[in-house]
Amino acid sequence: MYHYSKACHFKEIMDSGVIKRAMAGVPKSEKPAVWLTLNDEWEGTALKLDCMEPRHRNIFLPIRFKLKDELIDNGQVKFVSFEEHKKSGGMDLVYAKALSDSALEMGSNSDDWFCCYDDIPIDNFNEPEVWDGSAWVSIDHMNGILAESRKFVSDVKRLDRAKQNAIAAQKKAKRKAAHKAKAKNRKK
């Protein structure tokens, strides 16, 4: 059983020590889950088909984590099928159907999907692998590309912080100017 992700999330996963339940875009009525699949080749719903294009590689380089077989066999990691998640996980059935249909169009099958309602420690997975453009390889073979990915993501976050700081400074300057204008009008 595999969890697929992107290089831009790799550092966060390794730093936190867990693969966290997906929260973004999940309605409050639905249980957040770590998504897993039996598909050992590719998961179209988690990965971009053009991820190896230079303009996408830094962010969307596919990585995957394989859950250790013994943890599945002994039931140590609890999960439910996608069918069960639709019922007991509170998933909107119209959305679930659309997701299944789009998965088929991308070469995936929702019958391969499973959900775990707990964050999963990375120690429960074999060594992560990365897609090199033709095969899944040990993450060690791709450290250069992953370092580029981490730097790219770091640069984007730094630029975003700078933009937020500039916006805050503009707002502060406007408030100060408005305050001065108000004070000047009071003097008249």
Image: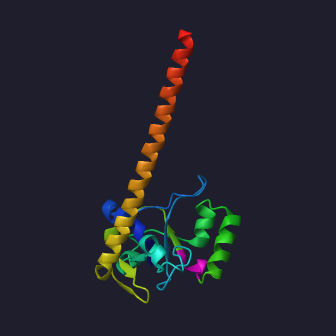
Quadrant of the rendered structure where residue 136 is? Answer: bottom left
> Which residue corresponds to the image point at 60% horizontal and 77% vertical from the top-left?
110
> Which residue corresponds to the image point at 30% horizontal and 83% vertical from the top-left?
141
Q: Residue furthest bottom?
A: 134
Query: Which quarter of the image is occupied by the C terminus?
Result: top right
Q: Residue furthest right?
A: 94
Counting from the top left corner in percent of width and height, residue 150 is at 35, 66
Report the colour scheme.
Answer: rainbow
Q: Which residues are magenta?
A: 108-113
Quadrant of the rendered structure where residue 85 is? Answer: bottom right
Relative to 61, say whether 21 is above or below.
above
Counting from the top left corner in percent of width and height, residue 121 is at 35, 65
> Which residue corresponds to the image point at 44% horizontal and 44% vertical from the top-left?
166
Considering depth in this image, is 173 or 122 the residue closer to the camera?
173
Counting from the top left corner in percent of width and height, residue 8 is at 41, 67
Is residue 92 something one can see in this rendering?
A: yes
